[in-house]
Amino acid sequence: MSNKLEAYLEEISHYLSGRAEREEILSEIRSHILEKAAAEHGGTGDDAVDRAIGAYGPPRRVAERYAEDRPIIAPAYKRHLVRYTTLLFAVHAALTVFGVITGKTFVIFPFLYMPVLGVFDAVMYLPMAFLADLGLVALVLYFVTQSGKDVKLPWPKIGVDLDEVKPPRKAFWGRVGTAIGAVVMLAVTDFAFYIFARYHTIFLYLTDGSDPRPLLTPEAGRYLSMIVIAQLALSTMTLLIKLFTRSPWVNIVSNVVSLGLIGLILRQTFDNLFAVDISEKLLRVVKGNIKITLLVIALIITYELVRDIVRVSLRKLDHVVPNK
Amino acid sequence: MTKQDPEPDIGSLETEMNRGFLHILALALLEKDMYGYSMVKHIETLGYRVEENTLYPLLRRLEKNGWIASKWDLSEDRPRKFYAVTAAGRALRASLLDVWKIQDRILDKLIKENSHVE
């Protein structure tokens, strides 16, 4: 028996894994290939078998022909996948924010366990939460689809219609706006960089007629300045790239980097932050406000990130499962 | 399955059309016992070509529904699986042929009507 034939059947078997009639299917294919090799290629030697295998097709494609027509998730539930995930993630995000503010743990066994999270943890946690929500909803819809029953799933009217979000129009004035934005951001970035090169910080305050003085301590000032300049440069580059492409990946990459930069800021304890005298009470208020502001910005970026990922995924789904 | 002269390229639409046709073809072919490879060769002599890796899953589905039956013949050097149409398969074939004839008649009529218009 040809080793190549056995290796070929083994690979098909791998893709058929779990099917009760696997052995029978492999026997049929083995019989056919040997028959063909003998009849058309002069025997059942390695060379002849190899040619017969080549004509039969790649193992994965062969195995897929045996798959039932039923999709993993019925096309009719595609919108449910988006809607339910949106709602679940909205609840998840709200609980996260509530948890950060109140310092409480939430448990909805076995679906949700949210320990007390800091602001930085929460920002890092949300994208994971989205994937978990998407997975949970997909799992439920998978079981509904595989049941083969005509289940009418509820259609909540609330929630953001991420599935109906349309890509931006390719209007002339839109491009002009992007171009102006890019120029302004380029100027701001350049200016910030100039200030940083001169004073080693961009956080300055002016006193009467004298040179500007650093608002923050040298270490904190340099660190935060670099992050802010990186964010400005990122925004500028994003706008410039968007002049030439409408690919949603531009926003996705940009937003992921932005979240990372916000994360870098939130990792700071903000102790020994100001170079000027400031009361303890005011310092606490300022710290709290910075954290809340950054959290809100992170939430907005996360929303945009999720929206763009959904948009890209839907486009890919449309390619995989053409509408019939 | 594709026509031997595949012009113009109608790709997936042809595949969809062929799905039903292949069912009738297999049920008609199996009026006498045949094994997979012999079916492929026989179809080729009729001016069509069926992809080998398409035929066997189709036969499996037909058998699962009781429209054909199969048995292994181990008397030769190589084991061969022979298939034959069942009574239920014959009834199905007759129904499918009726559907196909009606569709063919309708299309024929429409094409004639269109030729008058042109």
Image (cartoon, helix red, strand yellow):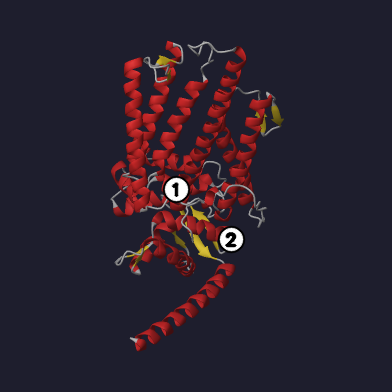
What number is the disc on residue A316? Answer: 1
* Residue type for callout 1: Lys
In the image, farthest residue toward the front: A208
Marks 2, 1 in one chain: no
* Residue type for callout 2: Asn
What number is the disc on residue B65? Answer: 2
Say which residue appears at 55% left-offset and 45% top-offset: A19
In the image, farthest residue toward the bottom: B116
Residue A238: x %, y % from top left: 37, 37
Vertical side of B15 occupied by A83: above or below: above
Residue A281: x %, y % from top left: 62, 15
Residue A79: x %, y % from top left: 57, 52
Q: Is residue A182 visible?
A: yes
* Chain letter, disc 1 residue: A
CA gap, disc 2 and disc 1: 35 Å
SS for callout 1: helix
Which image quadrant for residue A116? top right
